[in-house]
Amino acid sequence: MASETRRTHHQVTFAVLAASVMAYALLQSLVTPVLPTIQEDLHTNQNTVTWVLTAYLLSASIFTPIMGRIGDMIGKERVFVVTLAALAAGSLLAALATNVTVMIVARVIQGIGGGVLPLTFGIIRDEFPSEKLSGAVSAIASLIAVGAGLGIVLAGPIVNALNYHWLFWMPMILTIVAGIAAFVFVPKSPVRTPGRISWAPALLLSAWLVALLVALSQAPVWGWGSGKVIGLFVAAAVLAVGWVEIERRASMPLIDMAMMRRPAVWTNNLVALLFGVGMYAVFAFLPEFVQSPKSTGYGFGASITQSGLILLPMSVAMFVVGLFSNRMAARLGGKTVVLIGSLVGTGSMALLAYAHTHTWELYVATGVMGAGFGLAFAAMSSLIVSAVPPEQTGVASGMNANIRTIGGSIGAALMASVVTASPAADGLPRESGYTNGFAMLGGALLIAAFAATLIPVTRRSSVVTQGGGAGQEPAVAPGGTVVGEQAQVLGGSAQVVGEQAP
């Protein structure tokens, strides 16, 4: 009866989760178009102000899997509220910041909000009826990407009407409302994994991520061949190997390496990495492209608001298509949907690279891109959730989102190097730099398409209940896992997803 009571209110739970995810996603990108304004207002330089983005990225990369693991242990709804509180506190501090140091500290605190993602997927897995699970996961996955895109679209109008401080006030208000609603309406977790956090793996995870992301973010400034960058890459590799080894031997690992080696998990994570390379690089550099002065021969001299509107078709298409991704996956299979999304995304990058003379071409390209990303993101999230048992949902989905973030850092750093490789006499990038950069991103998504072919095939199988034959209602295990609903075909042998074979 308790389970039925929880599921009666799953639509209210979804509304709370959606608002929380939107607040977090907006904060991923709202500041990107207005960094020059922040730089001037806080009296700092370009190299320092980039840490307003880098600090947030580093913090989110570290806290996403940690908060997901803690939620699996002590209760997802409890940690979810704490995560929203940290996000609101960081937003408040950023809105009040009078110098760049305080702003960077605030962004680190906001990064704790990365835990919203794994906790959201875990709560959906716990609370939703089985027939609503995939649709809810797909919708939330779409909202993550849509929110990041809308952040760039909304930044200009907010700054013009108010000031950049409201880029933090508005998400803070939304986060506080969502936090109160979560405390009141989100039920307690029925699935928990007792244990403790292994701090050695957590510290090593933090260390290699910091080394990697600092190297990638600073390589365009320091030089890819500089001793500092090479040293950080070597340190990241050594620390990552040590982290994997300690996780393998830990009695209570932060991230289960056996889970990460599952075909359905590592293949989707590889695709997520490559999609992150493409998406975040476009968020960072397409506005720069259209804001370039007309004297360059390729730029449009657009304002912050105008450059943000170029990405509006992407956000709309991503959300709309993401809502229908689950239906396509039911008919074609999740693997096929991810493959289609990768190929569509590749085509959109080709349009950006070779058809960018008129603004309507950019609108078409970003709309096509949104369709491809919407298909792939929603399908990937569903595949990840269905590939692991309920107690690992938080960590698995958190790492998938985390890997996409790491891919974004890689993409932005690589794009910066390509775009600025041969500047013109006035110091601005040449058109060929952007052409080569967008073509490189298209190549990353083409590789993602090849990676998608490695995802194990999933298909609906006949449902056999505990008491009878096919066609009856599916048996539901504790935590809402549907026994026998999906079979994962690996080399001709079937294995039930969600319930692990002994």
Image: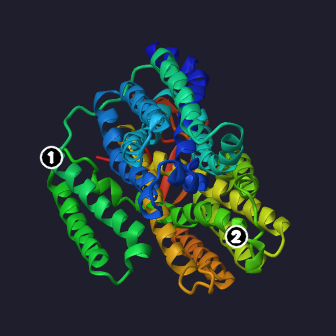
Quarter holding residue 287: bottom right
**Which residue: 50% across, 24% down?**
176
Q: Is residue 315 left or right of residue 355?
A: left
Residue type at numbered disc 2: Ser
Q: Nearer the viewer, mark 2 or mark 1?
A: 2
Dot 1, how many residues are within 10 Å of its Cα: few (below 14), some (14-19), or many (20+)?
Answer: few
What's the image's color scheme? rainbow
Picture coordinates of residue 37, whole percent (x, y): 58, 52
Picture coordinates of residue 343, whole percent (x, y): 66, 70
Residue 137 vs 433, above or below: the answer is above
Q: Earlier in the sequence, mark 2 or mark 1?
A: 1
Check disc 2 and report the residue beneath it: 292
| Foreground pick, 365 / 449 | 365
Picture coordinates of residue 357, whole percent (x, y): 81, 76
Residue 1 vs 191, above or below: the answer is above
Q: Secondary structure at mark 2?
A: loop
Real-space Cα separation, disc 2 to disc 1, in angstroms: 54 Å
Picture coordinates of residue 279, whole percent (x, y): 58, 62
Check disc 1 and report the residue beneath it: 251
Residue 424 vs 72, above or below: the answer is below
Residue type at numbered disc 1: Ser
Dot 2, how many residues are within 10 Å of its Cα: few (below 14), some (14-19), or many (20+)?
Answer: some
Q: Secondary structure at mark 1?
A: loop
**Which residue: 72% across, 50% down?**
321
